[in-house]
Image (cartoon, rainbow, N blue to C red):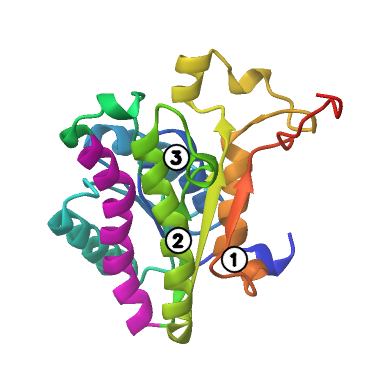
Amino acid sequence: MREQFAVEGQTALVTGASQGIGRSIAERFADDGADVVICSREQEKVDEVAEGINAEDGGECIPVECDVTDRDAVDALVETTVEEFGSVDTLVNNAGASFMANFEGISENGWKTIVDINLHGTYHCTQAAGEVMREGDGGQIVNFASVAGQDGAPFMSHYAAAKAAVVNLTKTLAFEWSDDQVRVNCIAPGFVATPGVETQMGVSADSIDRSNVDRRIGLEEEIADIAQFLASEASSYITGETITAKGVPDIMEDPDL
């Protein structure tokens, strides 16, 4: 591997890492020599992930129970990271949630819950970890949006609105914190073969051939590749950007239609 793609020696904080994309990112970073702190609202789930990571050669993993909507819990998460490893070099804001409903059917509580997790949680983690980065040597923040936040998403208006805000926050914060040597970027995945998608759509990661270009569903590992790129020096001239990963573009195939 070329040295500029390395994350070895970093301390990475990954939220929503009990399964899916967050877990894959944590495993990738640790496998490549980064120390990682992972969190989820359920301690036993991140304990299992950490146990697997720590059984392998690579970086150390510490699991922490944390609800990203709770500022005190987020502050404690960041404090634990600094106490254990001395810094926060990369923050991956992966924690998220949604449910399907038409707009008029979303209660105020339902709307607030989804916005709180996807947007307010990103605010909490970025502000807390960002303070450490800005007072230190800088760092990288990798936010997670979605193609829903770029294109809209019928029956997921709350989620799409929150993710659109994350895209905008990414660009704004990249400007504000550039003098502090903090790069802020975002990943907007399309469909990815996570356990949740497999349950909803019946598409398993085992059925996906990564070498096949003609597809509209990706693998967790492909998103981890992008996260590693954004956390490494290879992306040193990129900040404020949202990288969309959704496969083949959705273009009208028949010009006569």
* Residue found at x 48% / y 45%: 149
User: What amino acid type should be assigned to the residue bearing mark 1?
Assistant: Ser
Q: Give the residues in magenta.
A: 111-136
Which type of secondary structure does the marked residue at label 1 adopt?
A: loop
Main SS, magenta region, reads helix
Q: In the displayed structure, would residue 225 be above or below residue 72? A: above
Q: Nearer the viewer, mark 2 or mark 1?
A: 2
The residue that mark 1 highlights is 232
* Residue 23 as seen in the image, left or right of residue 120: right
- Labels 2 and 1: the sequence-earlier one: 2
- Labels 3 and 1: the sequence-earlier one: 3
* Residue 203 as seen in the image, left or right of residue 98: right
- Labels 2 and 3: the sequence-earlier one: 3
Residue 58, horizontal then vertical, whole percent: 51, 52
Q: Nearer the viewer, residue 133 or 116?
A: 116
Q: In the displayed structure, would residue 230 be above or below residue 24? A: below
The residue that mark 2 highlights is 168
Q: Are marks 2 and 3 in contact (CB under 8 Å)?
A: no
Q: Nearer the viewer, mark 2 or mark 3?
A: 2
Residue 105, horizontal then vertical, whole percent: 26, 24
**Image quarter in which the C terminus is found:** top right
Q: CA distance from mark 2 to mark 1?
A: 22 Å
Q: Which mark is residue 23?
A: 3
